[in-house]
Image (cartoon, rainbow, N blue to C red):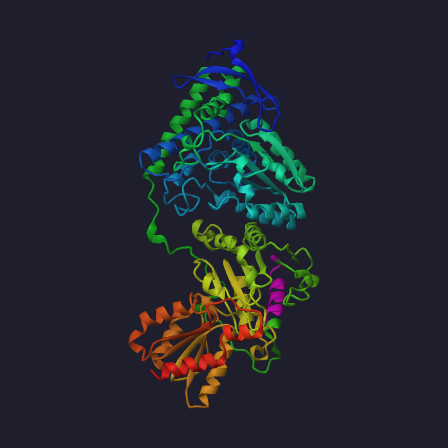
């Protein structure tokens, strides 16, 4: 090593946050090349023993060589088709991974966190298995993108490619930690660009309000792919954007220096342990390379800038400080580096020999097995003399019964404290206390996202949320619903968000554009979630009970018109009454034509069938009850007897779920059909507020009668 300390080589540089650091330039020999390095970071080893310092360098170097190996696989077209290098983030990633306690804390890394994941407990072989999308990849067997490292078995979470949305999951599990009086810490890690997302602000707000044990680590390299930070943020130190959150401690550190970062993380944890609230670490980093293999940073960064970043490479700075402080000799360092190279070679040989991801297993782990399956045949008869309950009462009673049955059941949403906007959960906050039933802010993405995170604490937990006060307001939560839909699949069964999302759906209440909408047509296109829509009180009981007891995510759509609709009442089922998902019910037998429906329009169909019976027309009415999955066998069996079909639903005809029913029947029972299948649904227009608009838009009994007659006349 040659150190040039002439006056021309000594200069003073200033960090991005204005903290002023002196930095000498040195020339180092590395892998037979002379490299000029700016000693930008202090690397104060003071309170760390020699063995710790050496171990940290071993890990840092191992991670960087593993990153180089990833780039090599790309060049060889052998895998790692997505690679986001971490060089320049070395300090914060090494410190964060080491701070995380395996099998105890919860770590939510992002796609650049290779060194974080390695230091946190994912082995070199497991890193390569992920990069090569092998079947034995511990993150999920190649189901997620390469460079998305996870190991759920030690609580390193499998997170989305959607930047920053795992912040809500970290807050959710931190909420569970606090509810259960645990001492775990939830660690969120992400880049500075993700802090611009609305749901990131929701996460910070929720964590701040409830003083949750979560550390938000921001790795600020000043670029969102090609977009420089100054073009999208008023503050180059993005943590300054969050200074108004009074319970959150913000700590700045040098993201290149693991020792400075480790001290910062300890300060964050001390703040949390004192019960003062969450913490944010702002780590000032460099992105030495391109954003990823698909990005060419030379198109938007000058050669001067790129050279400057290479000269202050954190690994080279670490190496020089080891020599300068006589922790290791050059020979000893080179021995460490050679051992790391051999370790990677050995791990690569094993990983490359592993079987590739098995695409034929695509149909496994789409959704967990429910508590009660159709094959269980457990839908017991209800005593017809039992006291009748209204639809709204059935939901309320079932929620209370399930909360008594399982003390690990929780409920939150907007206006929950007063019993919900429709009084569906009336009395629950008083009966079960605010620890289990509580209000949420008007932040639908946060409601669903924190529910997802909460259930990560243990598999006994069940969370019920009111996803929005009305279905029309659920759209902000769609981003988190997507996460719930494929968490189970992408982890290959290692994690299931056990969440029931209740949504008051539909019209006939003169609610207008934001209080009369139906979502099931859109929602049914998302694989990995169940969707149910009961039309009678007993079905509401049986389906809700199955939803709460089952693993996985269930959308429980409640037609609000039926809450107090007398015809939707039913005898009270017993405490163990459970209805399987995907099991339809024949509401009325008939021989001339089949109507398939669900929700409010089941009642319209029943009224139409009654009127048609007076004209000698025998109509069979099938109530699907469950939309995803749906009872194809029951529908096909009926159509093969009646030879005609009308599908009736409240949602729009275009894109409504009825189209799926029509397609299936056309394929499976075409030879049994004596007429084209007709659909009855809403017009393809928003539901207007004036009663005349609602009447003209939503389906009614007469629409059903006319459709039946048209089909019979064919």
Residue 651 drawn above or below residue 203: below
Q: Which residues are magenta?
A: 394-410
Q: Main secondary structure of the magenta part?
A: helix
Horizontally, residue 123 falls left or right of residue 176, namely left
Residue 561: horizontal and vertical position, in percent? 57, 73
Query: Residue 550: in sight, yes or no?
Result: no
Q: Residue furthest left?
A: 671
Residue 164 drawn above or below residue 614: above
Query: Residue 439: in sight, yes or no?
Result: yes
For residue 359: magenta?
A: no
- Between 603 and 472, the one nearer to me in the picture: 472
- Between 283 and 375, the one nearer to me in the picture: 283
Residue 610: horizontal and vertical position, in percent? 48, 86
Residue 684: horizontal and vertical position, in percent? 46, 68
Residue 265: image quadrant is: top right
Residue displayed at 41% across by 24% down: 339
């Amino acid at each position: 090593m040659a150190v040039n300390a002439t006056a021309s080589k000594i200069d003073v540089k200033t960090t991005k946050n204005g903290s002023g650091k002196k930095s000498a330039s040195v020339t180092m020999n590395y892998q037979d090349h002379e490299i000029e390095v700016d000693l930008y970071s202090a690397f104060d080893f003071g309170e760390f023993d020699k063995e710790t310092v050496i171990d940290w360098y071993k890990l840092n170097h191992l991670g960087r060589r593993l990153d180089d190996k990833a780039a090599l696989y790309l060049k060889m077209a052998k895998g790692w088709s997505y690679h986001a290098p971490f060089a320049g983030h070395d300090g914060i990633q090494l410190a964060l991974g080491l701070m995380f306690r395996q099998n105890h804390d919860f770590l939510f890394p992002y796609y650049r966190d290779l060194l974080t994941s390695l230091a946190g407990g994912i082995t070199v072989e497991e890193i390569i298995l992920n990069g090569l999308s092998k079947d034995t990849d511990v993150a999920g067997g190649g189901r997620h993108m390469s460079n998305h490292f996870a190991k759920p078995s030690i609580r390193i979470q499998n997170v989305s490619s959607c930047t920053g949305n795992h912040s809500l999951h970290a807050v959710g599990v931190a909420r569970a930690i606090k509810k259960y009086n645990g001492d775990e810490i939830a660690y969120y890690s992400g880049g500075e660009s993700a802090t611009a997302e609305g749901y990131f602000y929701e996460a910070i707000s929720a964590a701040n309000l409830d003083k949750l044990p979560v550390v938000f680590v921001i790795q600020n390299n000043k670029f969102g792919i090609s977009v420089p930070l100054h073009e999208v943020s008023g503050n180059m130190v993005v943590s300054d954007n969050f200074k108004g959150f009074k319970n959150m401690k913000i700590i700045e550190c040098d993201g290149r220096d693991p020792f400075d970062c480790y001290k910062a993380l300890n300060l964050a944890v001390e703040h949390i342990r004192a019960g003062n609230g969450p913490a944010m670490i702002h780590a000032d980093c460099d992105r030495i390379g391109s954003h990823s293999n698909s990005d060419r940073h030379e198109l938007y960064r000058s050669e001067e800038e790129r050279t400057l970043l290479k000269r202050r490479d954190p690994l080279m700075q670490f190496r020089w400080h080891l020599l300068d402080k006589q922790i290791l000799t050059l020979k000893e360092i080179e021995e460490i580096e050679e051992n790391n190279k051999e370790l990677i070679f050995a791990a690569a040989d094993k990983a490359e020999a592993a079987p590739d991801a098995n695409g034929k297993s695509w149909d496994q782990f789409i959704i967990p097995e429910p508590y009660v399956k159709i094959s269980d045949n457990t839908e017991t008869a209800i005593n017809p003399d039992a006291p009748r309950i209204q639809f709204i009462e059935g939901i309320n009673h079932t929620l209370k019964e399930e909360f008594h049955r399982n003390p690990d059941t929780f409920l939150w949403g907007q206006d929950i404290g007063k019993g919900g906007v429709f009084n569906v959960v009336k009395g629950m906050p008083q009966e079960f206390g605010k620890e289990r039933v509580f209000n949420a802010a008007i932040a639908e993405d946060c409601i669903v996202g924190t529910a997802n995170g909460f259930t990560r604490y243990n598999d006994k937990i069940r969370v019920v949320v009111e996803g929005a006060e009305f279905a029309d307001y659920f759209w902000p939560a769609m981003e988190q619903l997507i996460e719930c839909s494929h968490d189970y699949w992408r982890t290959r069964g290692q994690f299931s968000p056990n969440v029931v999302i209740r949504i008051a759906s539909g019209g006939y209440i003169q609610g207008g554009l934001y209080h009369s909408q139906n979502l099931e047509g859109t929602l049914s296109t998302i694989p990995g979630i169940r969707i149910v829509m009961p039309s009678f009180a007993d079905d509401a009981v049986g389906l809700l009970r199955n939803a709460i007891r089952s693993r996985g995510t269930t959308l429980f759509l409640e037609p609000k018109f039926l809450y107090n609709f007398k015809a939707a009442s039913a005898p009270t089922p017993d405490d163990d009454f459970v209805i399987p998902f995907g099991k339809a019910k024949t509401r009325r037998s008939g021989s001339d034509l089949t109507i398939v429906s669900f929700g409010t329009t089941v009642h319209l169909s029943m009224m139409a069938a009654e009127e048609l019976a007076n004209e000698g027309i025998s109509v069979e009415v099938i109530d699907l009850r469950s939309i995803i999955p749906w009872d194809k066998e029951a529908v096909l069996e009926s159509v093969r007897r009646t030879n005609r079909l009308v599908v009736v639903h409240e949602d729009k005809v275009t894109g409504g779920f009825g189209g799926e029913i029509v397609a299936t029947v056309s394929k499976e029972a075409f030879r049994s059909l004596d007429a084209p299948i007709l659909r009855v649904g809403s017009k393809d227009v928003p539901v207007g507020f004036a009663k005349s608009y609602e009447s003209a838009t939503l389906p009614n009994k007469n629409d059903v009668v006319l459709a039946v007659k048209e089909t019979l006349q064919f």
